[in-house]
Image (spheres, grey):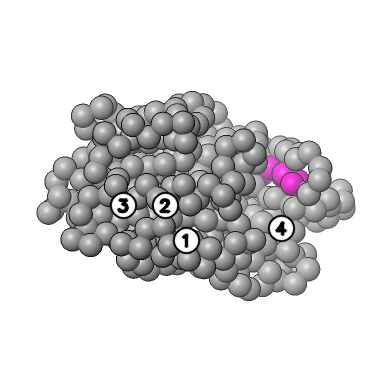
Amino acid sequence: MQALLNAIATMALPADAQRIFHGRGGLYPGCEQWSLDAYPPVLVLTSFEPCSDEELATLHAALAARWQDLAPGQALNWVYQCRAEGQLSETRLMAGEVPEPHVVLEAGARYQVHVLKGQNHGLFLDMAEGRRWVREFVQQQRTVKPELKVLNLFAYTCAFSVAALQAGAHKVVNIDMSAGALGIGRQNHRLNELPTGHEAGASFLAHDIFNSWGKITRGGPYELIILDPPSYQKGSFVATKDYARLMRRLPDLLASGGHAMLCLNTPKLDQAFLKDQMQELAPELQFVERVANPAVFADVSAERSLKVLIYRTPG
């Protein structure tokens, strides 16, 4: 775990939520099981394989020593989560405490997170550049399209919506099957003093899009559609069969000159999986670019990492 220890020894005091060490990218042989994230004022260490008490003690000593250098007199707060394949995940508070509510910053926005429960903490750190792209796109477009509307599918806790509205979007429609996740999304909008409502600001709909597209279609057309589904969630979404059902809808939902952001986060499918299907199912949409991932998420293969592709309609 030497590369992880080196990252701890040289890390800066984090202000925004961010990844500090990404062993999963395969660039640090022997450290593939480890990731270290900052959700200030808490550090979260994740192992994707079982580890020993001795290893945890070594890592605790390293974190404590670095924290003493970075924030003398301030308590070290850190959480350990084990996500070994085939085992139930385990989450432990190793030192200090976790604030409640736990609110973190990213690019000036505030988000509520929950690092002691579940495998997803409320804010996907690898999507930071995706949120930056949304901010910049909305800022550029709003001058010519002041009524700019965004459709945020599989919205989870609505971080994309916060980014879009802060950048000047007129309306964001957030849709997710989980009412609980959307509830956190509403809280994120309140934390950032953003408007909510059916005519302007953010709206929230707990809905299975595959049951009905009527309300979604009537709310369009949209200048930006964000698709960030799980790659595999039994009973909800399986990328290999369900992504095509989304792609077929895009031409009818997008405004002239509108853009679509297609996200895919699984090492088992490459970007050609998206590009080939888009060429077949929505050929009128033109590929624009792939959004780069945050540098800390570098991977031995770009095809294994998060894929965020941008398409646009003519016009």
Discs 3, 4 touching: Cβ within 8 Å:
no
The quadrant where residue 86 appears: top right
Is residue 82 part of the magenta span, yes or no?
A: yes
- Residue occupying image coordinates x 66% and y 56%: 35
Q: CA distance from mark 3 to mark 4?
A: 41 Å
Q: Is residue 205 above or below residue 49?
A: above
Is residue 142 part of the magenta span, yes or no?
A: no
Q: Main secondary structure of the magenta part?
A: strand
Q: Which residue is mark 1?
A: 277
Q: Which residue is mark 3?
A: 251
Q: Is residue 154 above or below residue 223?
A: above
Under tag 1, what secondary structure? helix
Q: Which residue is mark 2?
A: 247
In terms of sequence position, does the residue under pointer 3 or pointer 4 come before the other? Answer: 4
Can residue 224 be seen in the rendering of this structure? no
Task: Indicate the amino acid at tag 4.
Answer: Trp
Residue 166: x, y in percent?
A: 28, 44
Residue 230: x, y in percent?
A: 56, 46
In terms of sequence position, does the residue under pointer 1 or pointer 4 come before the other? Answer: 4
In terms of sequence position, does the residue under pointer 3 or pointer 1 come before the other? Answer: 3
